[in-house]
Image (cartoon, helix red, strand yellow):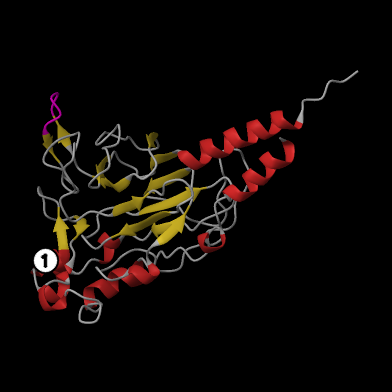
């Protein structure tokens, strides 16, 4: 005779799994570039630094970093780094004070940034990819959720290839290769490009010729300070996959062999087809859990 587990058993397991998903999040950083990069992380005010604030990531490798509810900060990739045994050195792009471990020091522009504020409880996460401070690497951030899909964001187009000459950052040794593309604000320091002074509001600070170049190449990324409308996304994710030098072509396969929805790019590298919009994905409501508890107990 079979002995069936009481409904309460399954309810307890469900609630445990739900709150495990709702209360924790992981950043998985992958290097698809054909060379080594050195990711850096920086926590925002009032949130702790991540367990890893700077590290070497060889081509083809991934690292997962746990975080806590409410964490806010940014993640970026550094290139052309050289460090000694004490962790001191220098990077061509994205440098953070000449240290392997950034330890509270942000990226020296130009650098492509993944920015996020994780929600607490049922509050949603807010995230974006920003090239407001310039660009050094292509990247895509893809949320993973327990109850539906959210929008991927980022840019797969190599802006270094089409960077205007006046914004180019070239290799220090031979000055022939473009390794990064500066923002107009950094290059010229004018209020109209930095959205400062009399231009410190969305009415007077409008897209410039330079930010428009960035926006055409990366329509989902922040291109200037007041680019919120098309660049900020929301989700309630258990994991964010942050991939540098992503390959986006046709169908993408997950690790378990299941093919996800098509992800395509246009001639500018824009992601034009992604998983379903996060605006239609809500966290599993607490009211349903309470109803289940009342039903079975």
Report the side of 81 relative to 253 (left or right). Answer: left
Residue found at the far bottom of this picture = 203
**Residue under label 1:** 187
| Of 146 and 189, the residue lying toward us | 146
| Of 88 and 65, the residue lying toward us | 65
- Relative to 83, is 112 above or below? below
Sort mark 1 into few (<14), some (14-19) or many (20+) by Cα contacts within 10 Å.
some
Residue 59 picture location, percent across and down: 35, 38
How many marks the image carries: the answer is 1
Report the side of 20 relative to 4 (left or right). Answer: left
Residue at (17%, 72%) from the top-left corner? 195
Report the side of 118 relative to 51 (left or right). Answer: right
Residue at (14%, 67%) from the top-left corner? 185
- Quadrant location of the C terminus in the rendered image: top right
Residue found at the far right of this picture = 1
Q: Secondary structure at mark 1?
A: helix
- Quadrant location of the N terminus in the rendered image: top right
Residue 42 picture location, percent across and down: 24, 44
What range of the chain is rendered magenta?
A: 84-88
Residue found at the far top of this picture = 1
| Of 178 and 128, the residue lying toward us | 128
Residue 153 picture location, percent across and down: 42, 58
Residue at (37%, 71%) from the top-left corner? 229
Residue 38 picture location, percent across and down: 26, 39
Determine the main secondary structure of the stretch shown in magenta: loop
Q: Is residue 206 magenta?
A: no
């Amino acid at each position: 005779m079979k002995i069936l587990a009481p409904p309460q058993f399954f309810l307890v397991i469900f609630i445990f799994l739900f709150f495990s998903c709702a209360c924790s999040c992981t950043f998985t950083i992958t290097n698809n570039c054909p060379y080594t990069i050195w990711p850096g992380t920086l926590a925002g005010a009032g949130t702790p630094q991540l367990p890893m604030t700077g590290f070497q990531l060889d081509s083809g490798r991934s690292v997962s970093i746990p975080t806590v509810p409410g964490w806010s900060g940014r993640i970026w990739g550094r290139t052309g780094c050289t460090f000694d045994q004490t962790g001191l050195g220098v990077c061509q792009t994205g440098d953070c004070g000449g240290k392997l471990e950034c330890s509270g020091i942000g990226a020296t522009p130009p650098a492509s940034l993944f920015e996020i504020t994780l929600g607490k409880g049922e509050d949603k996460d807010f995230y974006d990819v920003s090239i407001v401070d310039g660009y050094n690497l292509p990247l895509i951030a893809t949320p993973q959720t327990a109850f539906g899909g959210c929008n991927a964001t980022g840019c797969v187009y190599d802006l270094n290839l089409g960077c205007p000459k006046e914004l180019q950052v070239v290799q220090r040794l031979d000055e022939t290769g473009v390794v990064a593309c500066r923002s107009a604000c950094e290059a010229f320091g004018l209020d109209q490009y930095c959205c400062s002074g009399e231009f410190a509001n969305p009415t007077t600070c409008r897209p410039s010729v330079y930010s428009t170049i960035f926006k055409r190449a990366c329509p989902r990324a922040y291109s200037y300070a007041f680019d919120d409308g098309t660049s900020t996304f929301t989700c309630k994710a258990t994991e964010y996959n942050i991939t540098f030098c992503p390959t986006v072509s046709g169908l993408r396969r997950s690790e378990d062999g299941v093919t996800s929805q098509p992800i395509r790019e246009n001639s500018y590298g824009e992601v034009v087809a992604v998983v379903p919009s996060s605006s239609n994905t809500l966290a599993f409501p607490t009211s349903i859990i309470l109803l289940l508890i009342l039903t079975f107990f």
